Amino acid sequence: MSSKKNQPNPNPPGTRREQLQQQREQQAKERRVRNIITFSILGVALLAIVGVIVAVVVSSRTLPEASGGGAATGDYTIAVGQGDAPVTLSIFQDYMCPYCGDFERTNRDDLEAMVEDGTAKIEFHLMNFLDGGGRTYSTRAANAVVAVAKAEPEHVMAFNAALYDSQPEEAGMGLSDAEIAELARGAGVSNDVIATFAQMQHQDWVNRSNTAAYEAGVRSTPTVKINGTIWPGDGQTSAMFTPGALKAAVAEAGK
């Protein structure tokens, strides 16, 4: 029978205390990250939308009629911000949509500030309805964002911004995989995560996210909701591209 009595202690008292202290510090850091940026794929059934009509406006990209096939059964979101923020800002977007780019660039500083100070939590709903005719950029870009959100959520906002800063022409084929990878690298994403982009592990997630948006009544991008209510309202789409308008609306909703 073997005995461990004479085996050296692999964790001397001083070393063990240091390890425990490091573990506590690491756990505290991880809790802070989770409080700031969380990723959720919620498998809850969608409620039927009855009598909701979303106006098609000039300054948005209109979606085609939904095709047949299975309906999504979950609410697919990438959530950024504190879970107890008083306002939830839902953004439905397609990375090929030029108006989505205009919206993000107009409101970027305010979005980042509202997340940082806890004014609002942002829920990104990724769509790929602009794919087709050989184009796959919307799906490839969204797949990359989902990969980052799952593995390194602290880089989601920076990567989102980088994709819009380098947004390709809507009529073209979009950025190459290598170009998407380079943008992710510039946003701080690790090479290990970037290496997974080409595997398209989250393509099905993106497809279901797009279908879930249809099921929720979304018919144009960008569609923005403040605490579940479409903003800015019918005929007032220019507010989306007016600096400060969104921040003011969120502040009002948080009162």
Image (cartoon, rainbow, N blue to C red):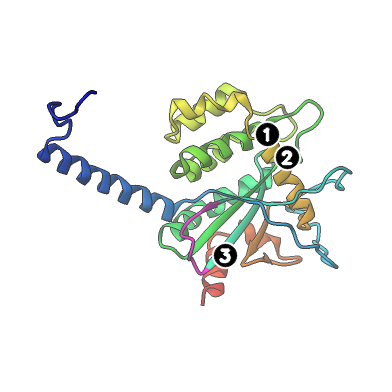
Alpha-carbon neighbours of circle 1 within 10 Å: few (<14), some, or many (≥20)? some
Give the residue drawn at x 47%, y 56%: 81
Pair 1/3: label in front? 1
The amino acid type found where label 2 is placed reads Asn
Give the residue drawn at x 46%, y 29%: 185
- Residue 163: x and y, percent? 56, 37
In the image, 136: left or right of 106?
right
On screen, residue 1 above or below 126: above
- Residue 11: x and y, percent? 17, 34
Badges 1 and 2: C-beta atoms under 8 Å apart?
Answer: yes
The amino acid type found where label 3 is placed reads Ala
Say whether residue 84 is magenta: yes
Read off the magenta span: 79-86
Give the residue drawn at x 84%, y 66%: 50
Q: Main secondary structure of the magenta part?
A: loop
- Label 1: which secondary element: helix
Spatial CA distance of label 1 from label 2 is 6 Å
Q: Which residue is mark 1?
A: 203
